[in-house]
Amino acid sequence: MKRRLYTVFLLTFLSTLTLCAQGKFFTGSGLNYVFDNHEFARSRNAYIPSETIHFVRVSNLFGWTFVQNENLTYNLVFGADLVKQMGTKINSLRDIVDDIPIFFESNFNDGNKTFIAVVGSYPRKIVKGVYSELLMSEETIETDFNLDGAYLGYSKGGFTTELALDWMGKYGNTRKERFQILSYGSWNIVPAFSLGWAGSFYHYAGSVEAPGVVDNHHLQAFIKYDFAAESEHSELSLKLSALGSYQRERLLDDLRLPFGGELEAKAQWRSLGVRNVTSYTENMLPFYDWTDSAGHLYGDMLYRGSKFYKGFYDLTELYWAPRITRKLDIKLSLRYHWGSEGLLGSEQRFSLLFDIL
């Protein structure tokens, strides 16, 4: 039996060497530093807690590129994400190894259309769609680095679309089965005018300890007009969205269909910008304070988007986002959150991204 195992291992190892010898080896690294200070004592932390998200992440990747022809290439990639939470002590390597991205990527580009397909555990930066924070909060984007599943992206002319699967939880005794499907599409009818959609379809199932399923699906349909579309360094745009949701607690057969609208105004000149998002919706988080069949709070495990969509909500963001070099970006922003009761709280955020991948 051992001899067979050794033979299988040797053949697999030799096959891998042969395959890798046919490709071009590459390495890459990136660093992401985030300081995000939340101050929400003014609203008694009713929406999100006052806290500071502060970490540095280094991503190291290596792999092989295979050229099929002038239009088609493949990448086989392995890597590691190392994360140091500021103010914590490192006792061993496992304290800072956050994730192990492993994925296969196929890229097709014939000069007219592009197509990308990815399978495995892949970096979130591959997802290019612009989603309302109802669907995916800034905190989720900055702290959840990789998606486990598959990705498809297509673009031709003024049309672009993507579909992404993130399998976040494997069914177990206490571990919930969870997965999210993201969908985005945008069509530039003319350079200044576009319309499209964004969707988040989230399946939050049970465990052995806590059986049950909750569906949490959001859909955003939008139109956008950029008054400065002809300018290379400016944006002056309005984006109007209709927001709808399908949410169902299956054990109790409780169905909710909240909806609303959102208007985003953005003005940017070179690296300076201001963005305002005003929304009015029904409560888009109806099960947030509920518990599952084992008494565990749904909370943030069920809702990965912003917690503010419960009526009138306004976000004002002032930012400075210069591109220092082709591989180095920084962003400094001030974010102010408003509700029907007035100012809810604010954020001061600084991020640095150095990417040589």
Image (cartoon, rainbow, N blue to C red):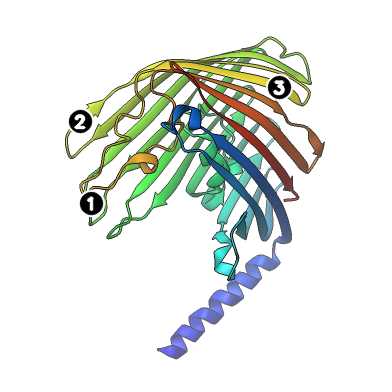
Q: How far, Cα to Cα, is label 1 from label 3?
A: 46 Å
Pinpoint residue 294: horizontal percent, then vertical percent: 22, 50
User: Which residue position is annotated with label 3?
Assistant: 273
Residue 241 at least partly seen: no
Residue drawn where x is 62% and y is 24% of the image: 317
Residue 9 at least partly seen: yes
Q: Nearer the viewer, residue 317 or 178?
A: 317
Pinpoint residue 261: horizontal percent, then vertical percent: 44, 15
Q: Residues within 10 Å of mark 2 (few under 14, many from 20)?
A: few
In the structure shown, which secondary structural element does the residue marked by tag 2 occupy?
strand
Q: Residues within 10 Å of mark 1 (few under 14, many from 20)?
A: some
User: Which residue position is annotated with label 1?
Assistant: 210
Q: Which mark is residue 254?
A: 2
| Amino acid carrying mark 1 in the image | Ala
Q: Quadrant of the N terminus?
A: bottom left
Q: Which quadrant would residue 235 be assigned to in this image?
A: top right
| Amino acid carrying mark 3 in the image | Gly
Whether residue 281 is situated above or below residue 111 in the rendered picture: above
